């Protein structure tokens, strides 16, 4: 075999070794059921985060590793001839921790006054972590009638750092770092 063919084959396999692991461990999390409503002179927002929990993540959580999901929500008034006006920018954090002594999951949600909710069921804890409902975005009197608005939102698992000696034990933790794409909803009030 000529050396140029060998080089091309080596480059091809090197390329596969680099690309395949990235695609095989890709997290498929997405925001769903995004909706806005109005109630008591408030613009309310809701959404779900689907596909956020993997088996490795559940194992890490039940081992006692605290995990946080961060949600970014921005509300803009769309201007045709100028920059958009940012009316609201909200950063939410949902945190889950497993208490091995009591065999319960403790979920704290910053947008619910940070008061923790305790549950024995991982399924219930998972639902609390991935659902945002009745979030107050803005007072309706701050919106102009017949104007164009946009909500942009995304979610990510908050990055955390383990002590150096645990990096080898929990090497799989980096496999469930993810963030969703930005999702946009346009509406006219």
Image (spheres, rainbow, N blue to C red):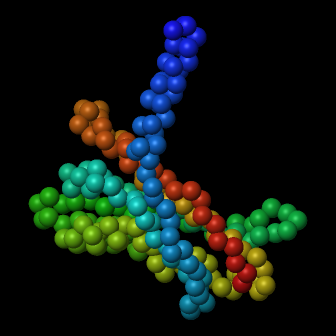
Identify which residue is drawn at 77% across, 70% down: 78
Viewer-side residue, 6 vs 56: 6
Q: Position of residue 127 (x, y in %)?
A: 34, 71
Which residue is farthest left? 101
Tell which of 148 and 160 is nearer to you: 148
Q: Nearer the viewer, residue 64 or 47?
A: 47
x and y percentages locating residue 162 in the rendered image = 31, 40
The vertical placement of 141 against 168, above or below, is below
Drawn side of residue 70 relative to residue 114, left or right: right
Residue drawn at 49 percent across, 62 percent down: 30
Q: Position of residue 75 (x, y in %)?
A: 65, 70
Number of numbered discs visible in the structure rendering: 0
Q: Is the residue 29 above or below the residue 12 in the image?
A: below
Kindly identify the residue that appears in the image at 56 percent across and 14 percent down: 5
Is residue 93 something that shows in the picture? Answer: yes
Q: Is residue 159 visible?
A: no
Residue lying furthest front in this view?
Answer: 1
Q: What residue is rendered at 14% in x and 58% in y?
A: 100
Q: Name the quadrant containing residue 172.
A: top left
Q: In which image quadrant can residue 88 be found?
A: bottom right
> Which residue, as the protein is rendered here, is positioned at the far bottom?
40
Q: Position of residue 177 (x, y in %)?
A: 42, 48
Above or below: residue 115 compared with residue 11: below
Assign the C terminus to one quadrant of the image.
Answer: bottom right
As drawn, is 170 to the left or to the right of 17? left
Q: Nearer the viewer, residue 26 or 119?
A: 26
């Amino acid at each position: 075999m000529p050396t140029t063919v060998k080089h091309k084959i080596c480059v091809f396999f090197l390329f596969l070794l680099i690309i395949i692991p990235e695609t095989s461990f890709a997290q498929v999390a997405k925001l769903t059921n995004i909706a806005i409503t109005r109630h008591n002179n408030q613009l309310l927002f809701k959404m779900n985060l689907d596909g956020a929990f993997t088996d490795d993540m559940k194992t890490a959580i039940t081992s006692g590793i605290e995990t946080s999901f961060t949600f970014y929500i921005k509300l803009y008034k769309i201007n045709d001839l100028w920059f958009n006006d940012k009316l609201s920018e909200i950063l939410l954090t949902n945190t889950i921790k497993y208490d091995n002594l009591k065999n319960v999951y403790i979920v704290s949600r910053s947008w619910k006054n940070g008061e923790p909710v305790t549950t024995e069921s991982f399924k219930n804890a998972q639902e609390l972590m991935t659902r945002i409902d009745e979030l107050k975005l803005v007072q309706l009197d701050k919106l102009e009638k017949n104007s164009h608005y946009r909500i942009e939102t995304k979610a990510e698992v908050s990055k955390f750092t383990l002590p150096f000696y645990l990096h080898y034990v929990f090497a799989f933790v980096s496999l469930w770092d993810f963030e969703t794409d930005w999702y946009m909803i346009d509406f006219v009030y």
